[in-house]
Amino acid sequence: MTMINRRNVLFAGAAGLGAGVIGAGQAVQAQTAAARTSLASSSAVSSLIPKPRKVNYLLKILDTDLNPDGEKSMKALTVNGTFPGPEIRMREGEMFRAQVENHLDGEETSIHWHGLLLPAVMDGVPGVSHTAIAPKEILVSEFPLLQSGTYWYHSHSGLQEQVGSAGPFIIEAENEVHDYDRDFVIFLSDWLHEDVESVMEELKEGEDMMSGMGMAEKPDLSDVKYPSFLMNGKGNNAPWSGEVSVGEKIRLRIIGAGASTLFKVMLADHKMMLSHVDGLPVELLEIDNLLIGMGETYDVIVTIQKPGAFTLHAMAQDGSGQAVGVLHTAGAAAVADLELPVWGPKSLAYSDMRSLTSTVLPEGPLHQIDMTLTGDMSKYAWGIDGKPYGEGENYFIKEGERVRVTMRNETGMWHPMHLHGHFFRVLAPGADADLIPLKHTVNVAPKETLSFEFIADNPGRWIFHCHNLYHAEAGMGRVFIYQI
Ligand SMILES: [Cu+2]
C-alpha cells in the first residue's frame, strides 16, 4: 500500500512539473512496469491459445531405380525411395511442415501440394510461387490445414512427375460427414519403359513428320502409349490388394495421378457410392463407374456384399490397358481378373454431383475471362489462345472479385484444367445450380465449352494449367495474378 501511494504521488508530481529529471525517471519506471504487465498478460493469454499439432515430414527427392511392373528396371525419381512416395496423413486443423531435400545429381526439383488451400509462397511451383529447389538444397514449407479430404503431392518441375515424384496427401476430417469403417488410398498412374525426355522429344518430332505429310487433325484419346498402368505403384504382375470383411464399408480414396492417362474405374460385383469430389464431401450418389482425369480425386464408399475377391478395375481411357487391384475377404485368394469388365449403366457425370450445402457465390463484381484451349497432336503445340505458357497474357484478377472462366476446348483431346490455391464451381449444363460441388480440377472434354467460377480470396500468383503433364510441358498454362 505504502509503495503504491508513494509512486502514485511521485508520478503525479512529475506529470504536474513537466519533464523534470526525477519525474522522467519515475515515468520510465512506471512505463516499464506497465510493459511488464502487458507482456505477462499476453503470455498468459498465449498459453491459453490451443496449439495445433504440428507434424514434420522429411521428404527426400532421390534418384532411384524402380521396376514396378516386373518388366524393366527404370531410372526413376522418388520421394524417400518408393513409388508412390510416403503417404502423408494429417488431420484437419493441424500444422503441416515439410522439409523437402533435393538429393538429385545436378537436377532441380520441387513439390506441389495438389488441391490444398495454402499461402501462395508455399505452393511449390518454380517460377510462380518460388524458385526451384537446387541440388543439395532444402525447402521448408509450413501451413495450417484448412480442409479435409483426399489430395496428393507431386513434382512441378519438367516431366519429373511421370517418373515417380508423387504421393498421396490425406487429411482426415474433424467431423466426417459420411459413415465408413476403413479407407484405402487408390493411387492410379501410368508407367514408361523408356526415358521420359525422349518420349517428349518423340511427341514433338511427330510434328514435323506429320505436318510434312499434310496429315489432318485426328481425334486423340491419348498422347503416350504406355506399357503399364499402376495401382498404388504396383503392376498387373503383382497387383495391390486389400483385405476386407463382408458388410464392411470401405472408403476408396481414388487419386488420378496419371501423367497423361484418364482412368475409368469400377469395382466388380459392387455399386459405388460417390462420397467426395476433389477432397470435399458431396451428397452420396450411387454409380457403377467413373472417369477420373489427371489431378482429380474421387472418394467412393463400397459396402462389401459377399465373401470373395473383387477386382478394382482402372482402365486407361483409350482402352490400351488397365491397372488392377483386389479387395478380398479372408480366405479368398487375392487374384485379379485381368479381363476388361462390364462397366454397368451408371457413369458419373459432373451434372449429377451435388454438394451438401449451397455453393452459390456471394454477389460481387463479375470478372469474365474467356479462353480457348488450343493445340493438336500433329503440331504438339498445346497452349491457350494459340500461345504457350510464358508467351500468352497472364490473367490479372483482384481480391474479392467473382471470377468466371469460360474455356472453349477446340482440340480433339481431354484437358483436365487445374487451378492452384482455389476451389471453383463447375457450371456444367444440367447441374443443380445451388448445389454445384467445389472442385480444383475440371476435365474439359474434346470440343466442349465449359465455365467455372470462384471468389478471388487467396492473394498471390497461382498457376492454372492442363494436368496432362505433356500438354503442360508444351505450354498449356497461364498464371492468375492478384493485382493490388
Ligand atoms: Cu491438356
Image (tube, rainbow, N blue to C red):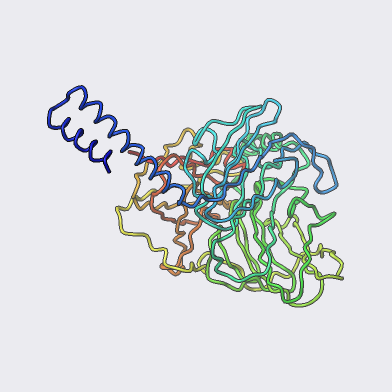
Q: For residue 240, say whether it is visible.
A: yes
Q: Is residue 369 left or right of residue 187?
A: left
The residue positioned 47% from the left and 41% from the top of the image is 120
Q: Quarter of the image containing the C terminus?
A: top left
Residue 112: image x %, image y %? Answer: 58, 42
Q: Foreground residue, 223 or 161?
A: 161
Residue 413: image x %, image y %? Answer: 58, 51
Looking at the picture, does residue 12 appear above or below residue 291? above
Q: Is residue 53 left or right of residue 358?
A: right
Q: For residue 379, say whether it is visible.
A: no
Q: Quarter of the image containing the N terminus?
A: top left
The residue positioned 80% from the left and 37% from the top of the image is 65
Q: Quadrant of residue 243?
A: bottom right
Q: Foreground residue, 201 or 451?
A: 451
Residue 53: image x %, image y %? Answer: 56, 50
Q: Is residue 96 left or right of residue 58?
A: left
Q: Is residue 145 left or right of residue 136?
A: left
Looking at the picture, does residue 148 appear above or below residue 357? above
The residue positioned 81% from the left and 57% from the top of the image is 239
Count of marks overlaid on the render: 0
